[in-house]
Image (cartoon, grey):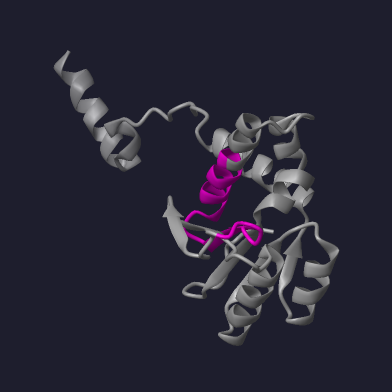
Amino acid sequence: MTGNGTAGRQQLLLVDGYNVLRSGSRYRQIAGPDYTDDTFNTAREALINDVVNYAGRDWHAIVVFDGGRNEFSTGEAESVGGVRIMFSPAGQSADKVIEKLAHDARERQVETLVVTSDATIQDTVFGFGVDRMSANGFSREVAMHYEEARLDDTPKVAEKNTVAARIDPAVLAKLKALRDDVR
């Protein structure tokens, strides 16, 4: 599923950050089996970069991480590459934030896609009429997005563009005749 919608139509991509990191094959490979702080941070950075690249200009995107157990989490968002990154506020789960954002977006008639493998969130947002994509589905979509971009950048054989190719054949024949008469 791509973000190419009707021209001028708003689209929102909501990503369940930690769920995708734990469930998406692309990010499990980065974090490895031990999930050290360093590998987890590397996976989180990869996810954010992937969302930035995938969303592009087609989607407004928000990645929500669970900050509910952090007493200092305010729920404020920061922007990275045009994507809003937020931790749920203290005492509130990322799930509830995502459900509220999805519901509010649909109320405003914004086409919304939620990326999560959490069955409860999927069921809840489906009831709002919101599209869903699993973490592995997102991993595959991102890989395809990068492959398409790579193929678009593959050098192509340039077509030889000469003046002769752009001149009317009758005029070209007269010019050749003139050239041959001069010799």
Image x and y of residue 2, in percent: 64, 58
Q: Residue furthest left?
A: 182
Residue 138 visible here: no
Image height of 91 relative to 43, above or below: below
Image height of 67 relative to 125, above or below: above
Which quadrant is home to the C terminus? top left
Q: Nearer the viewer, residue 45 or 173?
A: 45
Q: Residue at x 60, y 42 (%)?
A: 44
Image height of 131 relative to 127, above or below: above
Q: Nearer the viewer, residue 22 or 81?
A: 22
- What span is colored magenta in the figure? 45-71
Residue 162 visible here: yes
Q: Nearer the viewer, residue 24 or 140?
A: 24
Q: Quadrant of residue 121?
A: bottom right
Q: Residue at x 34, y 39 (%)?
A: 169
Q: Nearer the viewer, residue 89 or 133?
A: 89
Is residue 88 toward the left or the right of residue 182 in the image?
right
Image x and y of residue 65, in percent: 62, 56
Q: Residue furthest bottom?
A: 107
Q: Is residue 40 magenta?
A: no
Is residue 17 toward the left or the right of residue 118 in the image?
left
Q: Is residue 63 magenta?
A: yes
Q: Residue at x 18, y 20 (%)?
A: 181
Image height of 111 relative to 49, above or below: below
Image x and y of residue 56, in percent: 49, 54
Q: Residue furthest top?
A: 183
Q: Residue at x 70, y 38 (%)?
A: 27
Image x and y of residue 13, in percent: 60, 63
